[in-house]
Amino acid sequence: MKYLIVLFNLVLLTACNNTAEYTPKPSGYNRIEFPVKKYQPFSNSSPFSFDFPLYAKMYPDSTSRLKPNWYNLTFPQFNARLHISYYTIKSKQEFDMLMEDSRKLAFKHTVKATSIDEGVINIPEKKVYGIFYTIEGNTASAAQFYLTDSSKHYLRGALYFNEAPKIDSIAPIINFIRIDLDKMIKTFKWR
């Protein structure tokens, strides 16, 4: 019986001794096919207009009956949404409160963010001013901004993905959409 067990182990060891080496493949991500960048104007009865990508869809926000001129710019291919909210400024105190709220909402992501950069938006010929927050890391929002004419108009945008954030897999998409946000801001006009 001992000889049978030894013989079985030798056969097993010989069978497992293959000269071909196996190297496991590293983890990878799906290839992302980005659409061609083409834009269309968004202009309806809102007090603002801008260009947005053809591959995105603009919808009134579900609260639009209560909050007119609130929209969601969705990027279906990327499972992302830019929440757009507009306010008419009635006083200096309200203006200050809106700017502080935008700052607080952006810096609320500090817990998970590796960095939050503030970029100044200054387009005096169109009276478009604001701050663009670039939020790096595994955060719920990758980009936020506000635009204002400093007297009666205020618009805020926040980009969110409808999935758990994994920065290493969505970084190319964030960079792709940031170009669209830049185009939106550069073509932005008050009415």
Image (tube, rainbow, N blue to C red):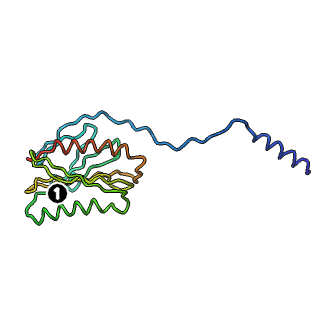
Q: Which residue is mark 1?
A: 67
Q: How many marks?
A: 1
The residue under the point 19% across, 53% down is 70
Secondary structure category for the residue under label 1: loop
Which residue is the extreme one toward the bottom? 93
Nearest to the observer: residue 140 or residue 116: 116
The residue under the point 32% across, 47% down is 80
Residue 86's x, y, as percent? 16, 54
Nearest to the observer: residue 134 or residue 152: 134
Residue 176's x, y, as percent? 32, 41
Task: Classify mark 1: residues with Cα within 10 Å, few (<14), some (14-19) or many (20+).
Answer: some
Q: Is residue 105 above or below residue 59?
A: below
Q: Is residue 44 above or below residue 87?
A: above
The residue under the point 42% across, 46% down is 169
Residue 28's x, y, as percent? 49, 42
In the picture, residue 117 is in which quadrant?
Answer: bottom left
The residue under the point 32% across, 54% down is 135
Classify residue 92 as left or right of residue 136: left
Classify residue 33 as left or right of residue 104: right
Residue 36's x, y, as percent? 30, 33
Mark 1 residue type: Lys
